Amino acid sequence: MGSFDFDLFVIGSGSGGVRAARLAGALGKRVAIAEEYRIGGTCVIRGCVPKKLYFYASQYAQEFSKSIGFGWKYADPIFNWEKLVAAKNKEVSRLEGLYREGLQNSNVHIYESRAVFVDEHTLELSVTGERISAEKILIATGAKIVSNSAIKGSDLCLTSNEIFDLEKLPKSIVIVGGGYIGVEFANIFHGLGVKTTLLHRGDLILRNFDYDLRQLLNDAMVAKGISIIYEATVSQVQSTENCYNVVLTNGQTICADRVMLATGRVPNTTGLGLERAGIKVNEFGAVVVDEKMTTNVSHIWAVGDVTGHIQLTPVAIHDAMCFVKNAFENTSTPPDYDLITTAVFSQPEIGTVGLSEEDALHRYKRVEIYRTVFRPMRNVLSGSPEKMFMKLVVDGESRIVVGAHVLGENAGEIAQLIGISLKGKLTKDIFDKTMAVHPTMSEELVTMYKPSYVYENGEKLDN
């Protein structure tokens, strides 16, 4: 113990790294953490936190419009992009300060430098060249955006790293990628009044989500004016005097003020010197870990996006909590990735947990689907055509609810609470016995008494 500078050295101060360092420090361990950019990682600095703030900002124009049906009258509102960016920066800095304070309160030593492996117990700080030894090491470097070499002129495009800090709001934008990042930003920019085009190489947005969610969100986005072009691949982006020309492989050209690539992230392991410590990575550059997040080197662990697992902040935090139990509390605690509730902050919003209808058919002999689409009371007076969708997927033999999917206002908040029910393996009968809160949108979840349709052995039965 005494031969090492620290009991634990954490590389990376994202959500997983900070949580692990804080918890280990609170146990009285000698802990250090290294960060080459800003404390807080992708989520706080250039991910979910600023994105949610922009999501809120983009909703106000629609809210102003909806208020007319409830008797309000207002002058045309004016949006100030620069003020939003400044407010975002202030909040991100506040949160970064809280993360730093939390580390300091747990007596964690912070090195503001990149750290790379020298050997399996030693790291070198790039800023000073100082070498530091640690008994245990945690890799929590997250994921990074990589350049898209398949697109000529990709260097002219923005990514989610730069999109929050544009000097001015563009009048038009092309977003490449139909995953949740692309979908969320398409809705954000459209809500801020930007002419928005979303390009997706597949045949429908949000692959691996429940089909109904995907189709209904597509329909809602198109209905409000977002242009979605499917089975489209970009071959080239050209800079002209007035705009950027986005040239598709089908020969079509789209002119826009800005172009954003939202084509995903890869594990951030390049240049860490992992080979000098003998740490294995897979073909995608992700650190290979076992069920307790240990690498092939027994005193080195990895958590969060760098492992190539599910790229979600709560997953990284959960990994970190399990890591501390495994490494310092002598409690065997593999992470539990079953039933992860997720949200897509589109407009309308998505909240989902458990199996999709399609996946359930491959797992259960009898599947019952409870499904409803309705226009919420608030939208009737406002004149908004937007509808709410809810679906419960039930194992017909055990009656356990194995999937829940919501599209509409506050869907993420609703899904978080349903996730508790699914984690507790509650049956549909318990849902049915639960008294509804009226009038609410979520009361539909406990008043869908009869299945909309049923599958037996993968075949849909006639009603």
Image: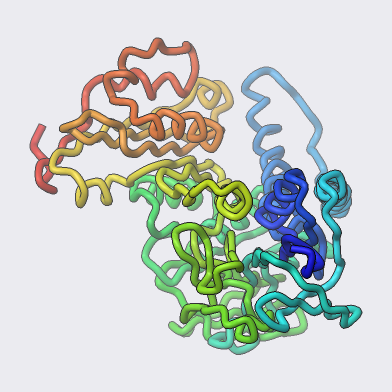
Looking at the image, is 30 positioned above or below residue 126?
above
The image shows residue 439 at horizontal and vertical percentages of: 49, 13
Q: Residue furthest front?
A: 2
Is residue 88 shown to the viewer in this render? no
Quarter of the figure with residue 41 = bottom right
The image shows residue 361 at horizontal and vertical percentages of: 20, 48
Quarter of the figure with residue 259 = bottom right
* Of 384 and 456, the residue lying toward us: 456
The image shows residue 383 at horizontal and vertical percentages of: 54, 28
Which residue is painted at 66% across and 51% down in the image? 48
Which residue is painted at 10% across and 31% down in the image? 463
How many numbered circles does the render carry? 0
* Of 179 and 322, the residue lying toward us: 322
Which residue is painted at 55% across and 59% down in the image? 311
Looking at the image, is 104 positioned above or below residue 276?
above
Q: Is residue 214 left or right of residue 59?
A: left
* Of 455 and 323, the residue lying toward us: 323
Quarter in which the N terminus is drawn: bottom right
